[in-house]
Image (cartoon, rainbow, N blue to C red):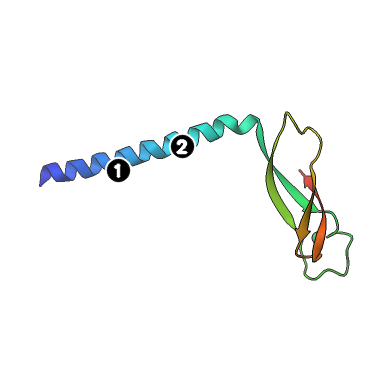
Amino acid sequence: MGEGNGQEVGCSVNLVSRTRRNVLPMAKNKGVRLVVTLECTQCRSNPAKRSPGVSRYTTQKNRRNTTERLELKKFCPHCNSATVHKEIK
Ligand SMILES: [Zn+2]
């Protein structure tokens, strides 16, 4: 009985160490893979929007390859059309 309990505790300790191990590589890539937010450029100047709010997309870029601000055409549900989304800070 007592031994069984001891094994259960050992299992849960293993799970915790595994979770920590998964976090470490992500922190290592922080310098290169940058998370950027893209915001719809039409939302602010478009008074006839379908719904209030600004469309935003989050993506990742490589800081070494892309030093300038990102611009991507994405579908904006507020403008109900594909618009240019620009990187914001
Ligand atoms: Zn929009």
Q: Residue at x 86, y 58 (%)?
A: 42
Q: Nearer the viewer, residue 1 or 61?
A: 61
Question: Mark 1, residues whose alpha carbon is within 10 Å: few (<14), some, or many (≥20)?
Answer: few
The residue under the point 76% across, 59% down is 75
Quarter of the image where ligand 1 sits: bottom right
Q: Which mark is residue 31?
A: none
State which quarter of the image contains the C terminus: top right
Q: Position of residue 51 (x, y in %)?
A: 77, 70
Q: What is the x, y in percent for residue 36?
A: 71, 43
Where's residue 31, x and y in %?
A: 64, 30
Task: Tell me the SS state at disc 1.
Answer: helix
Residue matched to label 2:
22
Three-letter amino acid code at the position of disc 2: Asn
**In this rendering, is residue 80 above or below 39?**
below
The extreme left residue here reads 1
Q: Quadrant of residue 19?
A: top left
Residue 9 occupies quadrant: top left
Question: Which residue is pictured at 11% across the width and 44% down the height?
Answer: 2
- The residue type indicated by label 1 comes to Ser
Q: Which residue is mark 1?
A: 12
Mark 2 secondary-structure assignment: helix
The residue shown at (43%, 36%) is 20
Which is nearer the N-term, disc 2 or disc 1? Answer: 1
Left or right position of 15 against 78: left
Q: x, y (%) of residue 39?
A: 77, 52
User: Which dot, 2 or 1, sits closer to the camera?
Assistant: 2
How far apart marks 2 and 1 lie (CA) works out to 16 Å
